[in-house]
Amino acid sequence: MSKRKLYMVSALIILFLVIDITLIKYKKDISQSASSFIIEKVMENEKKAIMKGREKTGYKHLSIFYTAPDEQLLPITKKSLNRAIELNDALFGSGYSKPYDFIIFSDRTEIESFSGLDYAIGIYSPDYNILGIVPEDKEGIIENIEPLVWNYQSNIIHEYTHYVFTQKIDENGLASTDFPLWFSEGVAEYLAYDSEAGRQLEVPNVIPLNELITVDQWNKYRTETVYNIYLQSEKAIYFLVDKFGPDIINKIILETGTKKKFLDGFERATNITIAELDDYIRNNLEEI
């Protein structure tokens, strides 16, 4: 075979290989796009189903969806959202007002079915563009009975804080997975308790913070009655704010964005390690 023919054959082989690889990649991209489209359609249909039959009212940057029997909850819901906005503006700054849907779920069965979580009382879902809450005692809340009103308000503040937190970290080029759950849930609980101090940890079992990072880890302990990981995480945040001032939360977020790693950002902002924070919480529960 002449050199010229050899070059032509080699060129054709390379061309066919390129075409084959391109087709494989194209089919893969099409497959991924189709899967994403299907998932989006399923989510869209699930959201439409939960919205069906609900009334809608606009409130600031939110759209509140509720069933007719729950209309009497609107005044306390709006009051609670106002407080949530005030607290988050004070901690993170104003301007976090991405339009969102806020759902008042009819009962716990409905919110558990939608969220896929047992014992759910609130939900925040960026995928669905939804904040949700279930009133645990509607009559008591409507009649303005404490602590039922306080509990309802704190749950709203908690979920609303997740909504603002997501926008805050997004502007720093970060995602929720860049932060351990004890931190994001702790911040939400800290504002939900309205900076209240002096509460006792209700159970003696404390989980090391490095075991409260992922969703799987969190769900492992979330419903166990011998733990209270929400309160434990809140105490961690309370300690940080009490020791370094409220702006420590923003500093940790900023340093995490700079360092591209939470542990490095945390230590840079606080000059302490997670292990030191763990030890302090474990040894000083009654003082936090």
Image: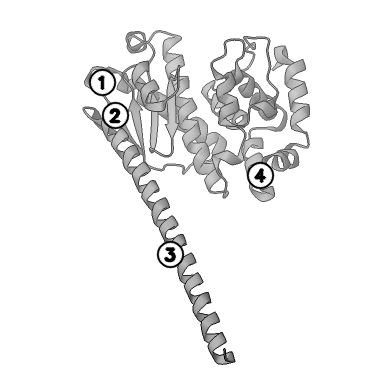
Along the line of sight, the residue nearer the viewer: 105 or 254? 105
Q: How far apart in space, not on screen, are marks 4 and 3 (Cα)?
A: 40 Å
Lower position in the chain sequence, tag 1 or tag 4: 1
Q: Secondary structure at mark 2?
A: helix
Lower position in the chain sequence, tag 2 or tag 1: 2
Q: How far apart in space, not on screen, are marks 2 and 4 (Cα)?
A: 37 Å
Q: Is residue 196 visible?
A: no
Q: Closer to the camera: disc 4 or disc 3?
A: 3
Instruction: Name the residue that disc number 4 marks.
Output: 256
Q: Closer to the camera: disc 1 or disc 3?
A: 3
For label 2, the crowd category at 10 Å Cα-Cα, with few meaning under 14, some 14 to 19 and many 20 or more, is some
Q: How far apart in space, not on screen, are marks 1 and 3 (Cα)?
A: 56 Å
Q: Closer to the camera: disc 1 or disc 4?
A: 4
How is the structure coloured here? one colour
Instruction: Name the residue that disc number 3 marks.
Output: 23
Instruction: Name the residue that disc number 2 marks.
Output: 50
Lower position in the chain sequence, tag 4 or tag 3: 3
Instruction: Name the residue that disc number 1 marks.
Output: 71
Lower position in the chain sequence, tag 2 or tag 3: 3
